[in-house]
Image (cartoon, helix red, strand yellow):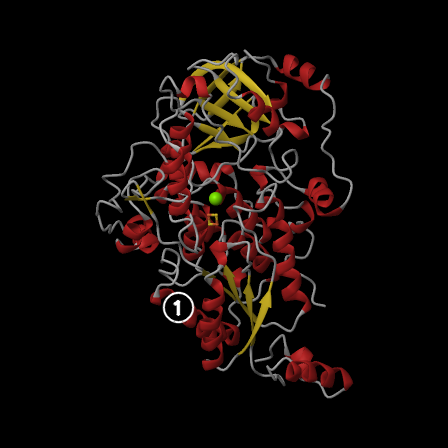
Amino acid sequence: MVLRSDKWFRRDDEVGVEHRAAMHAAGTPADGGRPVIGLLNSTSGLNPCNAPLTELAEQARQGVLDAGGIPVELATMSLGEDLMKPTAMLYRNLMAMEVEETLRANPIDGVVLLGNCDKTIPAQLMGAASADLPALQISGGYRRPGLFRGREVGAGTDLWSYWTERRAGRLDDGEWQALERALGCSAGACNVMGTALTMAMMAEVLGVMLPGAGTLASGSARLSELAYDAGTRIVRMTRAGETIGAKLTRAAFERALRALAAIGGSTNAIVHLIAIAGRRRIGLSLDDLAAAARAVPVLADVQPIGRHTIAAFDAAGGIQAVLSALESGVAPDTPVIRAPHSPVTTLPAFAVVRGNLAPDGAVVKTAATDGRLLRHTGPAVVFHGHDDLLARIDDPDLDVREDSVLVLTGCGPRGGDGFPEWGMMSIPKKLARRGVTDLVRISDARMSGTSFGTCVLHVAPEAAVGGPLAAVHDGDLITVDAFAGKLSVALSDEEIAGRLASLPRPSTVHRRGWPALYQRHVLQADRGADLDFLVPRDDGELTFVEP
Ligand code: FES
Ligand code: MG
Protein backbone atom coordinates (compact mmCIF):
# COMPACT_ATOMS: atom_id res chain seq x y z
CA MET A 1 0.00 0.00 0.00
CA VAL A 2 1.00 3.62 -0.41
CA LEU A 3 1.76 5.28 2.89
CA ARG A 4 1.19 8.91 3.68
CA SER A 5 4.86 9.25 4.58
CA ASP A 6 5.90 7.93 1.15
CA LYS A 7 5.19 11.42 -0.15
CA TRP A 8 8.09 12.60 1.99
CA PHE A 9 10.48 9.70 1.57
CA ARG A 10 9.85 7.98 -1.77
CA ARG A 11 11.09 10.62 -4.13
CA ASP A 12 14.34 10.92 -5.99
CA ASP A 13 14.91 14.64 -5.85
CA GLU A 14 16.76 17.03 -3.56
CA VAL A 15 13.69 17.35 -1.34
CA GLY A 16 13.56 13.55 -0.88
CA VAL A 17 17.24 13.62 0.06
CA GLU A 18 16.58 16.38 2.57
CA HIS A 19 13.74 14.39 4.16
CA ARG A 20 15.68 11.13 4.35
CA ALA A 21 18.79 12.90 5.63
CA ALA A 22 16.73 14.45 8.40
CA MET A 23 15.50 10.99 9.44
CA HIS A 24 19.08 9.66 9.41
CA ALA A 25 20.09 12.58 11.60
CA ALA A 26 17.23 11.84 13.96
CA GLY A 27 18.44 8.25 14.30
CA THR A 28 15.32 6.78 12.68
CA PRO A 29 16.19 6.16 9.01
CA ALA A 30 13.22 6.07 6.64
CA ASP A 31 13.11 5.58 2.89
CA GLY A 32 9.42 4.83 2.43
CA GLY A 33 7.37 1.69 2.69
CA ARG A 34 7.53 1.36 6.47
CA PRO A 35 4.78 2.97 8.56
CA VAL A 36 6.03 5.95 10.54
CA ILE A 37 4.26 5.90 13.88
CA GLY A 38 4.07 9.01 16.05
CA LEU A 39 4.27 8.41 19.79
CA LEU A 40 2.50 11.54 20.89
CA ASN A 41 3.53 12.03 24.47
CA SER A 42 2.09 14.62 26.86
CA THR A 43 4.34 14.21 29.88
CA SER A 44 5.48 17.24 31.84
CA GLY A 45 7.28 17.89 35.08
CA LEU A 46 4.18 19.73 36.23
CA ASN A 47 1.80 16.91 35.44
CA PRO A 48 2.40 13.99 37.82
CA CYS A 49 -0.66 12.23 36.42
CA ASN A 50 1.13 11.86 33.08
CA ALA A 51 4.56 10.93 34.47
CA PRO A 52 4.06 7.18 33.82
CA LEU A 53 3.71 7.85 30.08
CA THR A 54 7.44 8.12 29.43
CA GLU A 55 8.00 4.48 30.30
CA LEU A 56 4.91 3.41 28.39
CA ALA A 57 6.13 5.29 25.32
CA GLU A 58 9.25 3.13 25.47
CA GLN A 59 7.12 -0.04 25.50
CA ALA A 60 5.05 1.24 22.59
CA ARG A 61 8.23 2.16 20.72
CA GLN A 62 9.48 -1.40 21.08
CA GLY A 63 6.16 -2.74 19.83
CA VAL A 64 6.29 -0.50 16.76
CA LEU A 65 9.85 -1.62 15.99
CA ASP A 66 9.03 -5.30 16.40
CA ALA A 67 6.10 -4.93 14.01
CA GLY A 68 8.30 -3.30 11.38
CA GLY A 69 7.28 0.32 11.87
CA ILE A 70 9.36 3.39 12.52
CA PRO A 71 8.56 4.93 15.91
CA VAL A 72 9.07 8.66 16.32
CA GLU A 73 8.58 10.37 19.64
CA LEU A 74 6.64 13.60 19.53
CA ALA A 75 6.33 15.82 22.57
CA THR A 76 3.23 17.97 22.89
CA MET A 77 1.93 20.27 25.55
CA SER A 78 0.58 18.75 28.73
CA LEU A 79 -2.55 19.67 30.64
CA GLY A 80 -2.01 19.07 34.34
CA GLU A 81 -5.30 19.54 36.11
CA ASP A 82 -3.98 20.45 39.52
CA LEU A 83 -1.47 23.14 38.64
CA MET A 84 -2.68 24.92 35.50
CA LYS A 85 -4.53 28.18 35.98
CA PRO A 86 -7.18 29.34 35.50
CA THR A 87 -8.18 25.84 34.40
CA ALA A 88 -6.61 23.18 32.19
CA MET A 89 -9.87 23.24 30.24
CA LEU A 90 -8.90 26.62 28.76
CA TYR A 91 -6.17 24.74 26.90
CA ARG A 92 -7.97 21.55 25.82
CA ASN A 93 -8.78 22.98 22.42
CA LEU A 94 -5.27 24.40 22.02
CA MET A 95 -3.78 20.98 22.68
CA ALA A 96 -6.27 19.42 20.28
CA MET A 97 -5.12 21.86 17.63
CA GLU A 98 -1.50 21.07 18.42
CA VAL A 99 -2.15 17.34 18.06
CA GLU A 100 -3.95 17.79 14.74
CA GLU A 101 -1.36 20.14 13.31
CA THR A 102 1.57 18.02 14.51
CA LEU A 103 0.09 15.07 12.64
CA ARG A 104 -0.78 17.16 9.61
CA ALA A 105 2.58 18.81 9.18
CA ASN A 106 4.73 15.72 9.61
CA PRO A 107 5.33 12.43 7.80
CA ILE A 108 3.17 10.39 10.18
CA ASP A 109 1.16 7.36 9.09
CA GLY A 110 -0.33 6.29 12.39
CA VAL A 111 -0.24 7.52 15.96
CA VAL A 112 -0.17 6.28 19.53
CA LEU A 113 -1.67 8.92 21.80
CA LEU A 114 -0.22 8.97 25.30
CA GLY A 115 -2.42 10.92 27.71
CA ASN A 116 -3.83 10.53 31.18
CA CYS A 117 -4.81 13.61 33.19
CA ASP A 118 -8.37 14.82 32.62
CA LYS A 119 -8.06 17.00 29.52
CA THR A 120 -5.21 15.21 27.77
CA ILE A 121 -7.15 12.22 26.44
CA PRO A 122 -10.03 14.40 25.16
CA ALA A 123 -7.58 16.80 23.51
CA GLN A 124 -5.74 13.94 21.84
CA LEU A 125 -8.91 12.26 20.65
CA MET A 126 -10.30 15.52 19.28
CA GLY A 127 -7.09 16.22 17.37
CA ALA A 128 -6.80 12.64 16.14
CA ALA A 129 -10.47 12.59 15.10
CA SER A 130 -9.84 15.62 12.91
CA ALA A 131 -6.60 14.20 11.51
CA ASP A 132 -8.27 10.83 10.86
CA LEU A 133 -5.11 8.72 10.79
CA PRO A 134 -4.97 5.28 12.39
CA ALA A 135 -4.74 6.00 16.14
CA LEU A 136 -4.66 4.16 19.44
CA GLN A 137 -4.88 5.71 22.88
CA ILE A 138 -2.76 4.74 25.88
CA SER A 139 -3.37 6.04 29.39
CA GLY A 140 -0.86 6.17 32.21
CA GLY A 141 -2.95 4.38 34.82
CA TYR A 142 -4.19 5.57 38.15
CA ARG A 143 -2.04 6.41 41.16
CA ARG A 144 -1.99 3.91 43.98
CA PRO A 145 -3.99 5.33 46.88
CA GLY A 146 -2.34 6.54 50.06
CA LEU A 147 -3.69 5.91 53.55
CA PHE A 148 -5.32 8.45 55.83
CA ARG A 149 -6.92 7.62 59.17
CA GLY A 150 -6.21 3.99 58.29
CA ARG A 151 -8.15 3.90 55.04
CA GLU A 152 -7.37 4.48 51.36
CA VAL A 153 -8.01 8.01 50.16
CA GLY A 154 -9.62 8.68 46.81
CA ALA A 155 -8.11 11.64 44.97
CA GLY A 156 -10.42 14.63 44.84
CA THR A 157 -13.48 13.03 46.37
CA ASP A 158 -11.93 12.61 49.81
CA LEU A 159 -10.29 16.01 49.67
CA TRP A 160 -13.66 17.64 49.10
CA SER A 161 -15.27 15.80 52.02
CA TYR A 162 -12.36 16.39 54.38
CA TRP A 163 -12.39 20.07 53.39
CA THR A 164 -15.99 20.21 54.62
CA GLU A 165 -14.79 18.54 57.86
CA ARG A 166 -11.96 21.01 58.16
CA ARG A 167 -14.28 23.96 57.64
CA ALA A 168 -16.59 22.60 60.29
CA GLY A 169 -13.61 22.46 62.70
CA ARG A 170 -13.40 18.66 62.86
CA LEU A 171 -9.90 18.17 61.34
CA ASP A 172 -6.81 19.52 63.14
CA ASP A 173 -3.61 20.87 61.55
CA GLY A 174 -1.70 17.60 61.91
CA GLU A 175 -4.41 15.56 60.23
CA TRP A 176 -4.79 18.15 57.51
CA GLN A 177 -1.05 17.78 56.68
CA ALA A 178 -1.24 13.99 56.83
CA LEU A 179 -4.09 14.12 54.31
CA GLU A 180 -1.92 16.17 51.96
CA ARG A 181 0.84 13.56 52.05
CA ALA A 182 -1.63 10.72 51.52
CA LEU A 183 -3.08 12.47 48.48
CA GLY A 184 0.33 13.10 46.92
CA CYS A 185 1.90 9.71 47.43
CA SER A 186 2.51 8.63 43.82
CA ALA A 187 2.25 9.43 40.11
CA GLY A 188 -0.72 8.55 37.93
CA ALA A 189 -4.28 9.70 37.41
CA CYS A 190 -6.84 10.30 40.13
CA ASN A 191 -7.82 6.93 41.51
CA VAL A 192 -11.57 7.39 41.55
CA MET A 193 -14.19 7.60 38.82
CA GLY A 194 -13.06 11.13 37.97
CA THR A 195 -12.67 12.60 34.53
CA ALA A 196 -9.35 10.96 33.73
CA LEU A 197 -10.45 7.37 34.29
CA THR A 198 -13.88 8.09 32.85
CA MET A 199 -12.28 9.30 29.63
CA ALA A 200 -9.88 6.35 29.55
CA MET A 201 -12.90 4.07 29.78
CA MET A 202 -14.70 6.06 27.09
CA ALA A 203 -11.65 5.52 24.87
CA GLU A 204 -12.02 1.78 25.47
CA VAL A 205 -15.71 1.89 24.62
CA LEU A 206 -15.05 3.88 21.46
CA GLY A 207 -12.60 1.17 20.43
CA VAL A 208 -9.56 3.45 20.36
CA MET A 209 -7.89 1.94 23.43
CA LEU A 210 -7.10 -1.74 23.85
CA PRO A 211 -9.65 -3.54 26.05
CA GLY A 212 -8.76 -3.48 29.72
CA ALA A 213 -6.19 -0.70 29.43
CA GLY A 214 -8.33 2.06 30.94
CA THR A 215 -8.46 1.07 34.60
CA LEU A 216 -5.01 -0.27 35.47
CA ALA A 217 -2.72 1.08 38.18
CA SER A 218 0.25 3.13 37.05
CA GLY A 219 3.39 1.02 36.93
CA SER A 220 1.52 -2.25 36.52
CA ALA A 221 3.07 -4.87 34.28
CA ARG A 222 -0.19 -5.35 32.39
CA LEU A 223 -0.19 -1.69 31.40
CA SER A 224 3.32 -2.05 29.97
CA GLU A 225 2.25 -5.12 28.01
CA LEU A 226 -0.73 -3.29 26.59
CA ALA A 227 1.46 -0.35 25.61
CA TYR A 228 3.70 -2.80 23.73
CA ASP A 229 0.62 -4.36 22.12
CA ALA A 230 -0.61 -0.92 21.09
CA GLY A 231 2.72 -0.42 19.34
CA THR A 232 2.44 -3.62 17.32
CA ARG A 233 -1.27 -3.14 16.69
CA ILE A 234 -0.95 0.40 15.36
CA VAL A 235 1.53 -0.76 12.70
CA ARG A 236 -0.95 -3.39 11.52
CA MET A 237 -3.80 -0.88 11.58
CA THR A 238 -1.72 1.55 9.56
CA ARG A 239 -0.88 -1.07 6.96
CA ALA A 240 -4.57 -1.94 6.75
CA GLY A 241 -5.59 1.71 6.52
CA GLU A 242 -7.87 1.52 9.58
CA THR A 243 -8.35 5.14 10.54
CA ILE A 244 -9.87 6.41 13.77
CA GLY A 245 -12.77 7.95 11.88
CA ALA A 246 -14.11 4.50 11.00
CA LYS A 247 -14.47 3.76 14.72
CA LEU A 248 -15.96 7.07 15.76
CA THR A 249 -19.48 6.47 14.52
CA ARG A 250 -22.77 7.72 15.96
CA ALA A 251 -23.44 4.19 17.24
CA ALA A 252 -20.07 4.20 19.04
CA PHE A 253 -20.84 7.52 20.75
CA GLU A 254 -24.31 6.38 21.78
CA ARG A 255 -22.72 3.26 23.24
CA ALA A 256 -20.25 5.50 25.06
CA LEU A 257 -23.08 7.54 26.58
CA ARG A 258 -24.79 4.38 27.79
CA ALA A 259 -21.53 3.16 29.30
CA LEU A 260 -21.03 6.58 30.89
CA ALA A 261 -24.43 6.28 32.54
CA ALA A 262 -23.70 2.74 33.69
CA ILE A 263 -20.48 3.77 35.41
CA GLY A 264 -21.91 7.02 36.76
CA GLY A 265 -18.90 8.73 35.22
CA SER A 266 -17.74 12.31 35.23
CA THR A 267 -20.06 15.02 33.89
CA ASN A 268 -17.03 16.41 32.08
CA ALA A 269 -17.09 13.39 29.80
CA ILE A 270 -20.37 14.68 28.39
CA VAL A 271 -18.68 17.85 27.17
CA HIS A 272 -15.69 15.91 25.83
CA LEU A 273 -17.73 13.25 24.01
CA ILE A 274 -19.85 15.93 22.33
CA ALA A 275 -16.65 17.70 21.28
CA ILE A 276 -14.97 14.56 19.90
CA ALA A 277 -18.15 13.56 18.05
CA GLY A 278 -18.40 17.09 16.66
CA ARG A 279 -15.02 16.63 14.99
CA ARG A 280 -16.59 13.81 12.97
CA ARG A 281 -19.68 15.92 12.20
CA ILE A 282 -21.78 13.81 14.56
CA GLY A 283 -24.24 16.01 16.42
CA LEU A 284 -24.27 14.30 19.80
CA SER A 285 -26.73 16.16 22.03
CA LEU A 286 -27.90 16.42 25.61
CA ASP A 287 -31.04 14.61 24.49
CA ASP A 288 -28.85 11.65 23.53
CA LEU A 289 -27.38 11.77 27.04
CA ALA A 290 -30.82 11.96 28.66
CA ALA A 291 -31.99 8.99 26.61
CA ALA A 292 -28.93 6.95 27.62
CA ALA A 293 -29.38 7.81 31.30
CA ARG A 294 -33.05 6.82 31.16
CA ALA A 295 -32.26 3.52 29.48
CA VAL A 296 -29.31 2.39 31.57
CA PRO A 297 -29.07 2.01 35.36
CA VAL A 298 -25.92 2.73 37.35
CA LEU A 299 -24.02 -0.55 37.64
CA ALA A 300 -20.62 0.54 38.97
CA ASP A 301 -20.51 0.91 42.74
CA VAL A 302 -17.38 3.06 42.68
CA GLN A 303 -16.44 6.35 44.40
CA PRO A 304 -17.56 9.11 44.28
CA ILE A 305 -21.12 7.87 43.80
CA GLY A 306 -20.50 4.41 45.22
CA ARG A 307 -18.31 2.75 47.78
CA HIS A 308 -15.60 0.79 46.02
CA THR A 309 -12.22 1.67 44.57
CA ILE A 310 -11.14 1.60 40.97
CA ALA A 311 -8.89 -1.37 41.77
CA ALA A 312 -11.95 -3.35 42.83
CA PHE A 313 -13.82 -2.21 39.72
CA ASP A 314 -10.94 -3.31 37.51
CA ALA A 315 -10.71 -6.66 39.28
CA ALA A 316 -14.42 -7.18 38.62
CA GLY A 317 -13.82 -6.83 34.88
CA GLY A 318 -13.74 -3.07 34.38
CA ILE A 319 -15.57 -1.31 31.60
CA GLN A 320 -15.57 -4.42 29.40
CA ALA A 321 -17.68 -6.23 32.01
CA VAL A 322 -20.02 -3.24 32.13
CA LEU A 323 -20.32 -3.33 28.34
CA SER A 324 -21.22 -6.99 28.29
CA ALA A 325 -23.77 -6.36 31.02
CA LEU A 326 -25.34 -3.69 28.83
CA GLU A 327 -25.13 -5.48 25.53
CA SER A 328 -25.75 -9.10 26.26
CA GLY A 329 -27.29 -8.81 29.71
CA VAL A 330 -24.52 -11.09 30.99
CA ALA A 331 -23.38 -9.25 34.08
CA PRO A 332 -20.81 -10.25 36.63
CA ASP A 333 -23.31 -9.26 39.36
CA THR A 334 -20.58 -8.62 41.90
CA PRO A 335 -20.76 -6.07 44.70
CA VAL A 336 -18.73 -3.70 42.51
CA ILE A 337 -20.33 -4.22 39.10
CA ARG A 338 -24.00 -4.96 39.50
CA ALA A 339 -26.43 -6.64 37.18
CA PRO A 340 -29.04 -4.39 35.53
CA HIS A 341 -31.75 -5.86 37.79
CA SER A 342 -29.92 -4.78 40.97
CA PRO A 343 -28.45 -1.34 40.22
CA VAL A 344 -26.40 0.77 42.64
CA THR A 345 -29.16 3.35 42.90
CA THR A 346 -32.69 3.74 41.63
CA LEU A 347 -31.70 7.21 40.40
CA PRO A 348 -30.44 7.58 36.85
CA ALA A 349 -26.80 8.61 36.52
CA PHE A 350 -27.64 11.94 34.93
CA ALA A 351 -30.55 14.19 34.17
CA VAL A 352 -30.79 16.95 31.62
CA VAL A 353 -32.90 19.93 32.68
CA ARG A 354 -34.26 22.75 30.55
CA GLY A 355 -36.51 25.74 31.01
CA ASN A 356 -36.44 29.50 31.15
CA LEU A 357 -33.22 29.36 33.15
CA ALA A 358 -31.43 27.02 30.73
CA PRO A 359 -33.07 27.05 27.29
CA ASP A 360 -30.26 24.94 25.79
CA GLY A 361 -30.03 22.63 28.75
CA ALA A 362 -28.03 21.88 31.86
CA VAL A 363 -26.79 18.67 33.41
CA VAL A 364 -27.21 17.13 36.87
CA LYS A 365 -25.29 14.10 38.06
CA THR A 366 -28.33 12.75 39.84
CA ALA A 367 -26.56 9.60 41.02
CA ALA A 368 -24.07 11.76 42.95
CA THR A 369 -26.89 13.07 45.17
CA ASP A 370 -29.10 11.47 47.78
CA GLY A 371 -32.10 12.45 45.68
CA ARG A 372 -33.73 14.69 48.30
CA LEU A 373 -33.17 17.94 46.43
CA LEU A 374 -33.73 16.75 42.89
CA ARG A 375 -37.24 18.18 43.05
CA HIS A 376 -36.99 21.47 44.88
CA THR A 377 -38.11 25.10 44.92
CA GLY A 378 -36.20 27.74 46.86
CA PRO A 379 -35.00 31.34 46.87
CA ALA A 380 -31.84 32.20 44.93
CA VAL A 381 -28.62 33.39 46.52
CA VAL A 382 -26.62 34.75 43.59
CA PHE A 383 -22.86 35.04 43.17
CA HIS A 384 -21.35 36.74 40.15
CA GLY A 385 -18.07 34.97 39.49
CA HIS A 386 -15.70 33.00 41.67
CA ASP A 387 -14.22 36.00 43.51
CA ASP A 388 -17.66 37.06 44.63
CA LEU A 389 -18.39 33.51 45.75
CA LEU A 390 -15.19 33.27 47.80
CA ALA A 391 -15.71 36.71 49.31
CA ARG A 392 -19.22 36.09 50.57
CA ILE A 393 -19.98 32.37 50.87
CA ASP A 394 -18.84 32.19 54.50
CA ASP A 395 -20.07 35.63 55.52
CA PRO A 396 -22.08 35.12 58.73
CA ASP A 397 -24.53 37.74 57.45
CA LEU A 398 -25.14 35.95 54.13
CA ASP A 399 -28.88 35.55 53.75
CA VAL A 400 -28.90 31.82 53.07
CA ARG A 401 -31.14 29.04 54.38
CA GLU A 402 -31.40 25.31 54.06
CA ASP A 403 -33.84 25.64 51.19
CA SER A 404 -31.80 28.30 49.37
CA VAL A 405 -30.57 27.72 45.83
CA LEU A 406 -27.00 28.89 45.26
CA VAL A 407 -26.48 30.42 41.83
CA LEU A 408 -23.05 31.11 40.33
CA THR A 409 -22.76 33.02 37.06
CA GLY A 410 -19.89 34.02 34.80
CA CYS A 411 -18.12 30.65 34.90
CA GLY A 412 -19.06 29.16 31.54
CA PRO A 413 -16.79 28.53 28.55
CA ARG A 414 -16.63 32.19 27.56
CA GLY A 415 -17.21 34.00 30.84
CA GLY A 416 -15.10 31.83 33.07
CA ASP A 417 -11.77 31.91 31.25
CA GLY A 418 -12.15 28.40 30.01
CA PHE A 419 -15.09 26.79 31.79
CA PRO A 420 -13.65 26.13 35.25
CA GLU A 421 -14.74 23.47 37.75
CA TRP A 422 -16.42 25.77 40.24
CA GLY A 423 -19.88 24.26 40.04
CA MET A 424 -19.65 22.36 43.33
CA MET A 425 -19.85 25.47 45.50
CA SER A 426 -19.01 24.76 49.10
CA ILE A 427 -21.78 24.78 51.64
CA PRO A 428 -21.80 28.13 53.50
CA LYS A 429 -19.99 27.70 56.81
CA LYS A 430 -22.92 28.69 58.91
CA LEU A 431 -25.05 25.97 57.32
CA ALA A 432 -22.23 23.40 57.34
CA ARG A 433 -21.84 23.91 61.09
CA ARG A 434 -25.51 23.10 61.49
CA GLY A 435 -24.95 19.84 59.65
CA VAL A 436 -26.24 20.86 56.21
CA THR A 437 -24.34 18.80 53.63
CA ASP A 438 -26.17 19.59 50.40
CA LEU A 439 -27.90 22.51 48.71
CA VAL A 440 -29.16 22.96 45.19
CA ARG A 441 -26.35 24.70 43.33
CA ILE A 442 -26.78 26.04 39.80
CA SER A 443 -24.06 27.40 37.57
CA ASP A 444 -22.72 27.69 34.06
CA ALA A 445 -19.50 26.07 35.35
CA ARG A 446 -18.36 22.44 35.32
CA MET A 447 -17.48 20.38 38.35
CA SER A 448 -14.73 17.89 38.99
CA GLY A 449 -15.57 14.30 38.15
CA THR A 450 -14.73 13.51 41.75
CA SER A 451 -17.44 15.84 43.10
CA PHE A 452 -20.91 15.16 44.45
CA GLY A 453 -24.03 16.98 45.57
CA THR A 454 -27.07 18.50 43.87
CA CYS A 455 -25.19 20.62 41.36
CA VAL A 456 -26.89 21.76 38.17
CA LEU A 457 -24.02 22.32 35.75
CA HIS A 458 -23.13 23.58 32.26
CA VAL A 459 -26.17 25.89 32.08
CA ALA A 460 -26.48 26.96 28.44
CA PRO A 461 -26.43 29.56 27.20
CA GLU A 462 -24.07 30.85 29.89
CA ALA A 463 -24.49 34.21 31.62
CA ALA A 464 -21.60 35.80 29.72
CA VAL A 465 -23.34 35.40 26.36
CA GLY A 466 -26.65 36.73 27.67
CA GLY A 467 -28.09 33.52 29.07
CA PRO A 468 -31.00 33.96 31.50
CA LEU A 469 -28.84 32.87 34.44
CA ALA A 470 -27.48 36.43 34.36
CA ALA A 471 -30.96 37.78 35.10
CA VAL A 472 -31.48 36.01 38.43
CA HIS A 473 -31.61 38.18 41.55
CA ASP A 474 -31.36 37.19 45.19
CA GLY A 475 -34.68 35.89 46.39
CA ASP A 476 -36.06 34.86 42.98
CA LEU A 477 -37.77 31.50 43.30
CA ILE A 478 -36.02 28.75 41.36
CA THR A 479 -37.51 25.35 40.69
CA VAL A 480 -35.49 22.33 39.68
CA ASP A 481 -37.17 19.06 38.84
CA ALA A 482 -34.57 16.64 37.59
CA PHE A 483 -37.16 13.90 37.17
CA ALA A 484 -39.26 16.05 34.86
CA GLY A 485 -36.21 17.62 33.19
CA LYS A 486 -37.14 21.15 34.27
CA LEU A 487 -35.22 24.16 35.50
CA SER A 488 -37.03 27.46 35.84
CA VAL A 489 -37.12 30.75 37.65
CA ALA A 490 -40.42 32.37 38.59
CA LEU A 491 -40.03 35.26 36.18
CA SER A 492 -41.87 36.05 32.96
CA ASP A 493 -40.03 36.15 29.65
CA GLU A 494 -40.50 39.94 29.66
CA GLU A 495 -38.97 40.27 33.12
CA ILE A 496 -35.98 38.18 32.09
CA ALA A 497 -35.50 40.12 28.86
CA GLY A 498 -35.84 43.45 30.70
CA ARG A 499 -33.26 42.51 33.30
CA LEU A 500 -30.83 41.18 30.70
CA ALA A 501 -31.17 44.36 28.64
CA SER A 502 -30.15 46.49 31.62
CA LEU A 503 -26.96 44.53 32.35
CA PRO A 504 -23.55 45.92 31.44
CA ARG A 505 -21.64 43.99 28.79
CA PRO A 506 -19.32 41.40 30.31
CA SER A 507 -15.96 42.98 31.07
CA THR A 508 -13.48 40.09 30.98
CA VAL A 509 -12.65 40.38 27.33
CA HIS A 510 -9.13 39.30 26.43
CA ARG A 511 -7.36 41.34 23.81
CA ARG A 512 -4.46 39.12 22.83
CA GLY A 513 -3.07 35.64 22.74
CA TRP A 514 -4.80 32.32 23.13
CA PRO A 515 -7.40 33.54 25.65
CA ALA A 516 -8.62 36.12 23.13
CA LEU A 517 -8.87 33.54 20.33
CA TYR A 518 -10.58 31.11 22.68
CA GLN A 519 -13.07 33.64 23.99
CA ARG A 520 -14.05 34.74 20.50
CA HIS A 521 -14.63 31.27 19.14
CA VAL A 522 -15.61 28.92 21.94
CA LEU A 523 -18.98 27.20 21.61
CA GLN A 524 -21.38 26.65 24.48
CA ALA A 525 -21.31 23.63 26.77
CA ASP A 526 -24.09 21.80 24.95
CA ARG A 527 -21.89 21.95 21.82
CA GLY A 528 -18.87 20.55 23.63
CA ALA A 529 -17.10 23.89 24.17
CA ASP A 530 -15.00 23.32 21.07
CA LEU A 531 -13.93 26.25 18.93
CA ASP A 532 -16.39 27.04 16.15
CA PHE A 533 -13.75 26.87 13.40
CA LEU A 534 -12.55 23.43 14.50
CA VAL A 535 -15.96 21.83 14.02
CA PRO A 536 -16.29 20.86 10.36
CA ARG A 537 -19.02 22.75 8.59
CA ASP A 538 -21.60 20.87 6.58
CA ASP A 539 -20.05 22.09 3.35
CA GLY A 540 -16.44 21.98 4.57
CA GLU A 541 -13.59 19.51 4.90
CA LEU A 542 -14.13 16.81 7.50
CA THR A 543 -10.43 16.34 8.06
CA PHE A 544 -7.41 18.49 7.45
CA VAL A 545 -6.16 19.38 4.01
CA GLU A 546 -2.88 17.60 3.35
CA PRO A 547 0.09 19.95 3.30
FE1 FES B 1 -4.73 14.54 36.86
FE2 FES B 1 -6.87 13.90 38.39
S1 FES B 1 -5.54 15.61 38.54
S2 FES B 1 -6.04 12.87 36.71
MG1 MG C 1 -10.43 16.34 37.80
- Looking at the rendered structure, the number of numbered marks drawn on it comes to 1
Q: Where is residue 312 in the image (x, y as percent from the top left)?
A: 27, 51
Q: State the residue at coordinates (43%, 36%).
A: 451
Q: Position of residue 377 (x, y in %)?
A: 45, 15
Residue 275 visible to the viewer = yes
Determine the residue located farthest toward the bottom in the rendered image.
12
Image quarter hosting the N terminus: bottom right
Q: Which residue in the structure is indicated by mark 1? A: 224
Q: Where is residue 297 in the image (x, y as percent from the top left)?
A: 32, 39
Determine the residue located farthest toward the front in the rendered image.
174
Please identify the quarter of the rendering in which residue 416 is found: top right
Secondary structure beneath disc 1?
helix
Horizontal side of residue 545 vs 249, given as left or right: right
Mark 1 residue crowding within 10 angstroms, few (<14) / some (14–19) / many (20+): many
Amino acid type shown at disc 1: Ser
In the rendered view, would you say 175 is above or below 2? above
